[in-house]
Amino acid sequence: MSKRHIKAQLALGIVCAILAFVITTQLSSVRKNVAVESSKAQRAEELALELGKEKEKNADLYLQLYSAQNDLNQYRAQAEDSSDYAKIMSEQLKRSEVLAGLTEVEGAGIILTLSDSTYPSISGATVIENEALIIHDSDLRLAITELAAAGAEAYSINGQRIISTTPIRCVGPVITVNEQKMAPPYEICAIGEPKTLEAAVNMRGGLRDLFGSVGIGVEVKTSDKVKIERYTGTVNYKYAVPVINESGGDGQ
């Protein structure tokens, strides 16, 4: 056998070995990709099922709430027809519902609109400096706190009623209020003395100065009729219970 023939066989063997390695690697990669895609599809299906179950739960809770409100309206109507004492109790119940945010309200107030800064991101600036150009959950909480301090009696953010247990927080790139995702601009409706609430926004060192320093849009207008929807979620107190005094009544 000539040297040329031996070299040709050797070269052919090397090529075959390389091809075998490439094919084996490719098959392994394909199997891994198939396994990953299969896992993703399975996870997506599981999440879809969980989402469906949560939607069913929410629908059931809404029906229960609707039924309870109808029953409550019937009891209130019966009580108002029965005695003066019952009418007083009914009025107290209505007031409690307003304070708890469980009924729709309207009155004079302001509409405050906040929008992300129009300033461009600064090249070379820190992440924190550039994040100051967008509205965060802390900014919305601050706005609500300032309006409450100025005498606001009821408020909402993008239609979501704010009550004592309302969570306002950042979840990734979005803000949730009452677990509802929101995006800017954020419209804050507040019922109270319009001029006082407007002054709280525009006073020196107030919300306009604070947000305006980084270009965040602040628009405020007064209105004789601001409408705020009722809270539609559920409030469950698992650990907080009324204090019972020694005489057997509650702690009022």
Image (tube, rainbow, N blue to C red):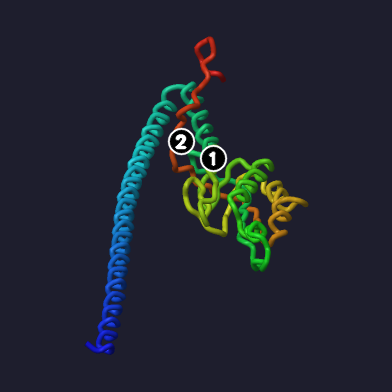
* Residue drawn at point x = 49 percent, y = 40 percent: 103
**Between residues 226 and 42, which one lies in front from this camera angle?**
42
Can residue 239 be seen here? The reply is yes
* SS under mark 2: loop
Residue receiving disc 1: 163
The earlier-in-sequence mark between 2 and 1 is 1
Residue type, label 1: Ile
Q: Quadrant of the N terminus?
A: bottom left
* Badge 2 vs badge 1, beta-carbon distance below 8 Å: yes
Q: Nearer the viewer, residue 51 or 102?
A: 51
Name which residue lies at 68% across and 56% down. 211
In the image, what residue type sits under mark 2? Val
Q: Is residue 127 above or below residue 51?
A: below
Instruction: Kindly identify which residue carries mark 2.
Output: 235
Q: How many marks?
A: 2
Whole-percent x and y of residue 10? 28, 81
Q: Could you tell me which residue is drawn at 53 percent across and 19 percent down?
A: 243
Return the x and y of residue 161 as percentages of the image width and height. 52, 45
Q: Quadrant of residue 67?
A: top left
Image location (x, y in percent) of residue 175: 53, 52
Assign the C terminus to one quadrant of the image: top right
